[in-house]
Image (tube, helix red, strand yellow):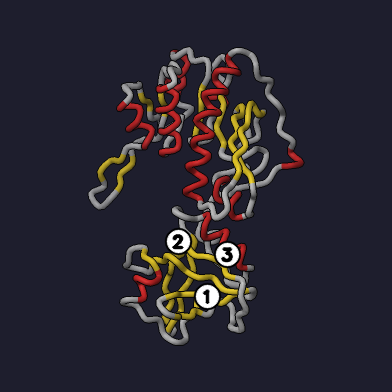
Amino acid sequence: MGTPEFAAEILEDLCRKGIDIVGVVTAADKPAGRGKQLNQSAVKKKALALNLPVSQPVNLKEEQFVSSLKSLSADFFVVVAFRMLPEVVWSIPRLGTFNLHASLLPQYRGAAPIQWALMNREKQTGVTTFLIDQQIDTGAILEQIKVDIPQGCTGGLLHDLLLEAGKKLVAQTIDQYSQGNILPKKQPDTASTEAPKLNKENTRLDWQWPGEKIDAWVRALNPYPVAWTELIQNDLVSTAKIYAGKYVSAPSHLLPGTLVIEKKTMKVALKDGWFVIDQIQLPGKKPMTAAALLNGFSPSSDAYLH
């Protein structure tokens, strides 16, 4: 059970390793683009390519859907990046339903564990398989794999590192738990932290922040959903997305947010230094390097970021 590319990759890996998959559940096709053509999820595309039966329920409690799941007689349901399941579904399999989560639970429970681990400048994260229960990301832990976070890591890179660890962990959990070699362990609530869904408010940069925090935010939100800020010049306000840059600890006597252009470089004054913008996107333009942008864009002398 899953929807995005992360889940599709794990589905393919399980097939490659000879795991007997009796069915795939994913999100319904959704209209997308100007023509509003129905778009299939990454999991559906992969399942069809692997000749696996696909179910796309709208209502997970619908009687016919629940009956179809029971008829599969599956030992496990494996969930990777899917909706919250009702008990009438996750209680069906003989050995239960387990989920793959991209953190070392109970740390970073929630929708965006990859990004929040980076935003909080963690040195290590990982992946966890756990049994689903009535709450979100609170079930008993089956197994975990730790992953060190490289210096300068982006959200995209960490996604890929955790995907590889996740492939290994899901197959390992299926093998070991089915043989009775794993004893589920209750999560300690005292050590839990949250990874709330990303939105417009918590992806906005605040130029009053320390430089290391701004650097971490930009890396964590690259390539999606991307950190953003307001560019203000000549009393006009526009949105700028900051894809990449670096914090430089050097004296700055300007107000935080002041935009400075020097020799085809674009940098922002901070309380404790400068943030040098490497890649940026302005409204109506594609993401581009700051140097490329400055070939045809000249901010006003009073321009600043807010």
Residue contact between numbered discs 2 and 3, judged by CB atoms under 8 Å: no
Residue found 50% across the figure and 50% down from its top: 155
**Secondary element at tag 2:** strand
Few, some or many residues within 10 Å of mark 1 (<14, 14–19, 20+)? many
Identity of the residue furthest to the right in this view: 190
Q: Which mark is residue 243?
A: 2
Distance of label 2 from label 1 (alpha carbons): 14 Å
Q: Nearer the N terminus, badge 1 or badge 3?
A: 3
Q: In the rendered image, which residue does mark 1 sit on?
A: 268
Q: Which mark is residue 214?
A: 3
Q: Quadrant of residue 102?
A: top right
Q: Is residue 47 left or right of residue 192?
A: left
Q: Position of residue 111 (x, y in %)?
A: 55, 44
Tell me the number on the disc at residue 26. Answer: none
Mark 3, other Cα within 10 Å: few <14 / some 14–19 / many ≥20? many
Tell me where residue 107 appears, x and y as whole percent.
Answer: 66, 42
Tag 3: residue type? Ile
Q: What's under tag 2, amino acid-wise?
A: Tyr
Q: Nearer the viewer, residue 205 or 18?
A: 18
Give the residue type at disc 1: Val
What distance separates the C-alpha of mark 1 from that of mark 3? 11 Å
Residue at image x 41%, y 38%? 5
Are the residues at dot 2 and dot 1 in contact (C-beta closer than 8 Å)?
A: no
Q: Residue at x 40, y 30 (%)?
A: 57
Quarter assignment of residue 187: top right
The image position of residue 285, as x and y in percent, is 32, 67
Say if residue 36 shows up in the picture.
yes
Residue 232 in the image: x percent, y percent? 46, 79
